[in-house]
Amino acid sequence: MTKRVCMGNEAIALGAAKAGVSVVSGYPGTPSTEIIETFLNEKIPGIEVQWSTNEKTAMEVAAGAAYAGARSMVTMKQVGLNVAADPLMSLSYVGVEGGMVVVVADDPGPWSSQTEQDTRHFAKYANLPVFDPSSPEEAYQMVSSAFDLSEEFKLPVFLRPTTRVCHASATVDLENDPGPRPAAGFEKKPDWIIFPALSYRKHGELEQKQKLISDKVSALPFNRIIKGGRKGIAVSGISYLYAMEVIKEFDLDLTVFKVGTPYPLPLKLAEEFLSSVDQVMVVEELDPVLEEQLLLVSAGKNEIFGKMTGDMPCNGEYSFESIKNRLLKYAGAESADPDMVEIPNLPVRPPVLCAGCPHRASFYAAKTAAKNYEKTVYCGDIGCYTLGNAAPLNTVDTCLCMGAGITIAQGIKLAEKETKCIAFIGDSTFFHTGIPGIINAVYQNTDITIAVLDNHTTAMTGGQPHPGTGRTAMGMPAKPLDIEKILRACGVEHISTVDPFKYEETVAAFNNALEYNGPSAVIAKAPCIALIKLPGAVRRVNEACIGCLKCIKHLGCPAMSVGNDGKVVINESICTDCSLCVNVCPVGAIKKVDRNV
């Protein structure tokens, strides 16, 4: 056994490797991304790893491996589970042969997501067990238990780390890695084919398994009771660490029910806990999943407080500070020292497109072309380019979910015939869920313009490859899929491919696309600035600057600011010589110079 400081996501990957996983699939999404990145960095022999096209694909790949008796893992963030829900719900009936762990990283806050949805609801909805780790160390141990439980009951099993568990670091005791378990091989049987009669029978069997699973998880070390007074708290996930910190610091006499498997509830332990206390405060991040189950078990015998009573916040991420006074009040203890200085909030720093980002050039060109029309709606999507919504670009009016920009644009166009609609989508998102919407636009002959912002990577989550990059997650060469050819195969006839930094050409391409009657496309192709080295030249503002600030007001480039004399200054340490600002300056005051001069 060795000790190693691990990020939570790293611990999950190493725990899976220790448990004998042989196939890992997923789609990048914060806070889950580093799980697969760890497998790629560790280069563990015998483990097949892939960034799949989307979460549905990843779920089905992992399921196929588990059908063949291999241990498999699929990773995603909470909104990715929405994409994978169709195969998941059927998998709960069909089942698996080898162990299959579904890692879904929830994002209370939310810090980098559209929603704060709680995966424990999905577990209950699908009648599948869920493990809820409170720390990286526990996440490492839970993975093995999740695989064992999956194989015993022939069901996929959830692991639901949250952002703090995923991105926290801790010293983890790593056990010896025995290597991937060999797959028994796919055995043909009728139960792999989900016909209605089978579904009816499997649903009944699944319901019967719930008590057996509950009894099984009651004996796991992740569920336990810490004896104290007649007032109790029930805690799940990262909230356990916060609650224990409050209890220890203020010496609170509380009985603690730690729940590591919130569904199905470890019923025997829950009954034992409720019989030992009169009142219960439930502390859990996001929804009252644990609280609702305890209310049913208690059947009115205990006073239960939590989100449903307004005693705990129902949204946002918890912390020591956010639950401290609530627990002190509940325990009847004195509040913290009134003279204690409250930690001030950090200043808000909204995200912004990088200096030299090709998306800024694409947005500006599209906006310039759209000035010819009375009304243009810019439909955005999920990725770095969502940041186009901020001033001064103001070129993202809608953003719903992966791939929806193209189809939202179609709905707006149908409702407002005279409105021009431009749908922006990134290259990775194009492959993820963009193609069906494009096919629909062609099939319905809807007059929208699709702007594919191709920066050659999955930029927002750290630069992962996708089907257009020409390599796999494991670094193997792959046939790069051509976005223009795919658009033509989908039936789009008017397509332009441009370098967005060639300003006049890009404006002309958008003009022509907007004038075209029917679905049109502009592919703005330039690499993410994170993929290239800074050039030897930069842009510098000379004495001709008149202080009009048009370059700042129109572009919002973070390399540009206002100097003490009211004129523009360019931060040459981050300038990429993209030259976009040159097209905005009315007096030609921005010149190209050597970076080191």
Image (cartoon, rainbow, N blue to C red):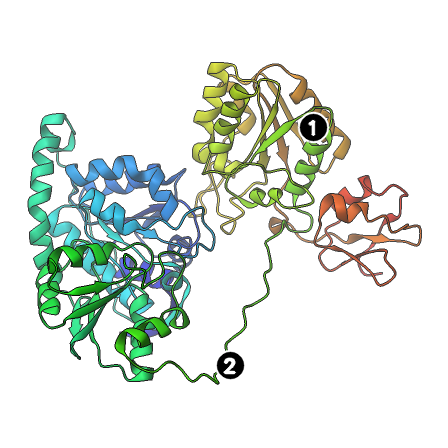
**Residue found at x 28% / y 73%:** 330
- Residue 2 figure quarter: bottom left
Q: Is residue 214 left or right of residue 470?
A: left
Q: Is residue 449 above or below residue 123?
A: above
Quadrant in which the C terminus appears: bottom right
The location of residue 256, given as percent across then percent down, is 20, 73
Seen at 42% across and 56% down, the residue is 34
Q: Which residue is mark 1?
A: 370
Few, some or many C-alpha atoms within 10 Å of disc 1 (few <14, some 14-19, many ≥20)? many
Image spot of residue 362 (x, y percent): 66, 36
Q: Callout 2 environment at 10 Å: few (<14), some (14 to 19), or many (20+)?
A: few
Q: Earlier in the sequence, mark 1 or mark 2?
A: 2
To which quarter of the image does residue 206 belong? top left
Residue 76 coordinates in the image, percent (x, y):
36, 48
Q: Amino acid at mark 2?
A: Val
Labelled pair 1, 2 in contact (Cβ < 8 Å):
no
Please give left or right for residue 179 compared with residue 544 in the image.
left
Secondary structure at numbered mark 1: helix
Question: Which mark, residue 341?
Answer: 2
Residue type of the residue flagged with mark 1: Ala
For the N terminus, give its image quadrant.
Answer: bottom left
Q: Nearer the viewer, residue 123 or 512?
A: 123
